[in-house]
Image (tube, rainbow, N blue to C red):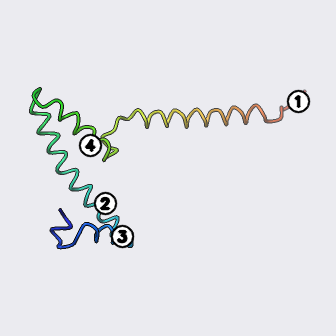
Amino acid sequence: MAAAGAGVTPRSVQLWEKADEAFRNAVAAAEQIGFAGVIESELYRRALAGQEDRGSMRALEMVVKSRDAAYREKSQISLEVVQRAEETHRRLVDGWNSAPAVESAG
């Protein structure tokens, strides 16, 4: 719709995105702003609609989560943090186990 509003074809926009990183970044930012505005207002509307709109609410929720990481469950992030902590702990313990023993004086 934005391409048509600007008087160019969607294909032209795609070609410009491939050729120009700054343009590609600007398009991505504009898409995110538009997505957030439309989808968030629709999420709010459907949340207030109540029980009669539950199926479409779930579908919309899936779309939102696929497009914006801020809406995803945090369990994946938590799992990555735990894995990194365990790996760091393992490296520390392995380092201590492989260090030469220090003899006590006396």
| Residue 4 point in image, percent of width and height | 17, 67
Q: Quadrant of the C terminus?
A: top right
Q: Mark 4 points at which residue?
A: 64
Is label 1 or label 3 in front?
3
Q: Mark 1 points at which residue?
A: 105
Q: Distance between the residues labelled 1 and 3?
A: 66 Å
Residue at x 11% of width, y 26% of height: 51
Q: Mark 2 points at which residue?
A: 28
Q: In the picture provided, is 61 more to the left or to the right than 78?
A: left
**Counting residues from the N terminus, which is met first, the one under dot 2 or under dot 4?**
2
Q: Name the residue under label 3.
A: 22
**Counting residues from the N terminus, which is met first, the one under dot 1 or under dot 3?**
3
Q: Which corner quadrant of the image does residue 52 belong to? A: top left
Q: What is the three-letter code of the residue carrying label 2?
A: Ala
| Residue 27 point in image, percent of width and height | 29, 64
Q: How far apart are marks 2 and 3 (CA)?
A: 10 Å
Please say if 37 is above or below 42. below
Q: In the picture provided, is 23 more to the left or to the right than 93?
A: left
Q: What is the three-letter code of the residue carrying label 4?
A: Val
Q: Distance between the residues labelled 2 and 1?
A: 66 Å
Disc 4 crowd rating (10 Å Cα; few below 14, some 14-19, many 20+) is: some
Q: What is the three-letter code of the residue carrying label 1?
A: Ala
| Residue 96 point in image, percent of width and height | 74, 33
Q: In the picture provided, is 80 more to the left or to the right than 104?
A: left
**Counting residues from the N terminus, which is met first, the one under dot 2 or under dot 3?**
3
Helix, strand or loop status at disc 2: helix
Q: How far apart are marks 3 and 4 (CA)?
A: 25 Å
Disc 2 crowd rating (10 Å Cα; few below 14, some 14-19, many 20+) is: few
Residue at x 18% of width, y 51% of height: 37
Q: What is the three-letter code of the residue carrying label 3?
A: Ala
Camera-side residue of 86 and 44: 44
Helix, strand or loop status at disc 1: loop
